[in-house]
């Protein structure tokens, strides 16, 4: 019983340790491949912003994509 | 028993804390190969104000500040100032190709296995570390946006007067 309790305590402690920075983490000086333009989620961020604005003003179900609100969405 | 578990918990929480370079700490020494295979050591610049710049050819702001750094170097190198560009790329080919188009006059060192970047805890690209004449870190700057060169300049000027 006691052993079990210690084991449970230890496993909980291990979970606490998971809040630590993970070791195989990409350091800023290792971002060679991540910095490649092909890794970008969006190839045309500015034109997507305009589209988001248009969608956001026309359709209630669209939104929370970072587009600015307000206006008629006509420009 | 309780004490032992508390001790374990303290250990688990303390483990991830890593030592990094701080201002007013001694700049860790390193040896790296420069262009042409010559090895360069940091301590050989003792007595001069040294600016370390961690850069990569894939990093836009780094490319942007390189010509500015070169003009700072050209202006102050005769007055006891050295600039060292530490290239962080594992493969230096892209860096060398870029340097052919945008040549700089200060020495470029190649940190191909990221040893020095790790040693200095580089937490942003580009990172700039300014070391005074005694070998103490005096300024750490992360990133670059237009106008930051004024910060470098004022720090360099005041350190050269010391």
Image (tube, helix red, strand yellow):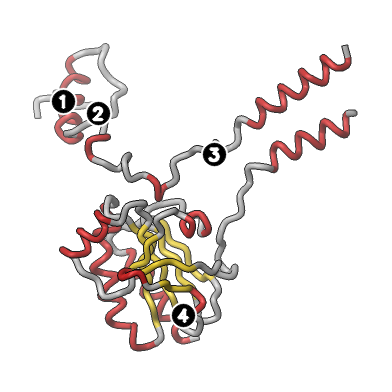
Q: Residues within 10 Å of mark 4 (few under 14, many from 20)?
A: some
Residue matched to label 2: A67
Residue B77, compared with residue B41, is above or below; it is: below
Chain letter of disc 1 in the image: A
Chain letter of disc 3 in the image: A
Q: Earlier in the sequence, mark 2 or mark 3?
A: 3
Query: Do the dots labelled 4 and 2 sit on one chain?
Result: no
Q: Are marks 1 and 2 in contact (CB under 8 Å)?
A: yes
Residue A49, compared with residue B27, is above or below; it is: above
Residue B34, compared with residue B120, is above or below; it is: below
Dot label at residue A15:
none
Cα separation, mark 1 vs mark 4, equals: 55 Å
Residue matched to label 3: A23
| Left or right of A11, for residue A19 | left
Dot label at residue A51:
1
For the residues carrying marks 1 and 4, which lies nearer the camera in this image? 4
Chain letter of disc 4 in the image: B
Q: Residues within 10 Å of mark 3 (few under 14, many from 20)?
A: few
């Amino acid at each position: 019983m006691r052993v079990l309790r210690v084991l449970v305590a230890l496993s909980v402690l291990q979970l606490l340790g998971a809040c630590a920075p993970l070791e195989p983490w990409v350091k800023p000086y290792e971002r060679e491949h991540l910095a490649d333009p092909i890794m970008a989620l969006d190839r045309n961020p500015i034109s997507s912003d305009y589209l988001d604005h248009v969608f956001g003003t026309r359709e209630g179900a669209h939104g929370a994509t970072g587009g600015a609100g307000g206006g008629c969405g006509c420009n | 028993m309780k004490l032992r578990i508390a001790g374990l918990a303290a250990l688990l929480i303390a483990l991830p804390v890593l030592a990094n370079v701080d201002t007013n700490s001694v700049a860790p020494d390193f040896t790296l190969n420069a262009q042409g295979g010559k090895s360069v050591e940091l301590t050989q610049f003792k007595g001069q104000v040294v600016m370390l710049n961690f850069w990569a050819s894939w990093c836009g702001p780094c490319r942007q500040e390189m010509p500015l750094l070169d003009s700072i170097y050209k202006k102050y190198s005769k007055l006891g100032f050295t600039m060292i560009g530490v290239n962080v790329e594992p493969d230096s080919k892209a860096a060398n190709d870029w340097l052919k188009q945008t040549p700089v006059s200060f020495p470029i060192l190649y940190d191909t296995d990221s040893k020095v970047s790790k040693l200095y805890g580089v937490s942003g690209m580009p990172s700039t570390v300014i070391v005074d004449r005694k070998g103490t870190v005096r300024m750490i700057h992360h990133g670059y946006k237009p106008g930051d060169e004024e910060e470098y300049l004022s720090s360099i000027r005041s350190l050269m007067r010391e």
